[in-house]
Amino acid sequence: AEQYSNVEVRKILVSTKTSDGRPIQYLKTSSPEVTALEVTFPPGGSTGWHQHPVPVYAYVLDGSLTVNMENGQSFVFNRGDAIFEVMNTLHNGTNLGSVPVRLVVFYTGAVGVPNVIRQEQTLPQPRKEPAQTGE
């Protein structure tokens, strides 16, 4: 990590792969656009099944988020975890806990390209106990 004389720097995560182990991809565009959001999931709250056509990075400020993938994999991300989200893969994030989950999310997309594509078809509901945990 970079070092500064009066600033503390803590490395959270360095990776060449997304949370499901696929290589990180960058969007090729002449019109880049970055969107930063704070997202809050109440207990029981869920994103619904969706996918991202752009790279997405998140940081868990509070709580514990369970992410189920269309292939049956499941990951849990806790307070202090960085998330390198999957691209072009259906997934559903759910707060299975009793306290709100708060994330800071960064979409590194392009002007005119949606950050999220919702899935209309119903896929299996989130498991109560995840099969795998995130870093």
Image: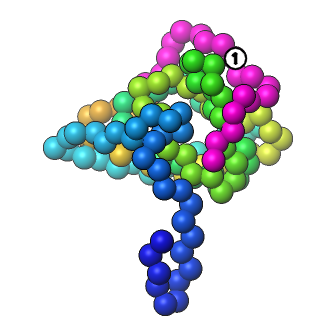
* Foreground residue among 18 and 97: 18
Which residue is drawn at the image coordinates 26% and 34% (left, top)? 112
Q: Position of residue 29 (x, y in %)?
A: 20, 40
Q: Residue reaching furthest bottom?
A: 5
Q: Is residue 46 above or below residue 122?
A: below
- What's the magenta bit mostly, secondary-structure-wise? loop
Please name the amino acid that badge 1 sits on.
Gln
Q: Position of residue 121 (x, y in %)?
A: 54, 9
Q: Is residue 38 above or below residue 129?
A: below
In the picture, measured across the screen, residue 5 lies left or right of residue 44, that is left
Which residue is drawn at the image coordinates 77% and 34% (left, top)? 96
Which residue is drawn at the image coordinates 66% and 13% (left, top)? 124
Q: Position of residue 120 (x, y in %)?
A: 51, 12
Chosen colour scheme: rainbow
Q: Residue reaching furthest top?
A: 121
Q: Quadrant of residue 75?
A: top right
Q: Which residues are magenta?
A: 117-135
Q: Residues within 10 Å of mark 1 (few under 14, many from 20)?
A: few
Q: Quadrant of residue 77?
A: top right
* Foreground residue among 1 and 89: 1
Q: Position of residue 1 (x, y in %)?
A: 48, 71
Q: Is residue 101 visible?
A: no
Kindly state the secondary structure of the residue where label 1 is placed.
loop
Q: Residue reaching furthest left?
A: 30
Which residue is drawn at the image coordinates 74% and 30% (left, top)? 130
The stretch drawn in magenta includes residue 2? no
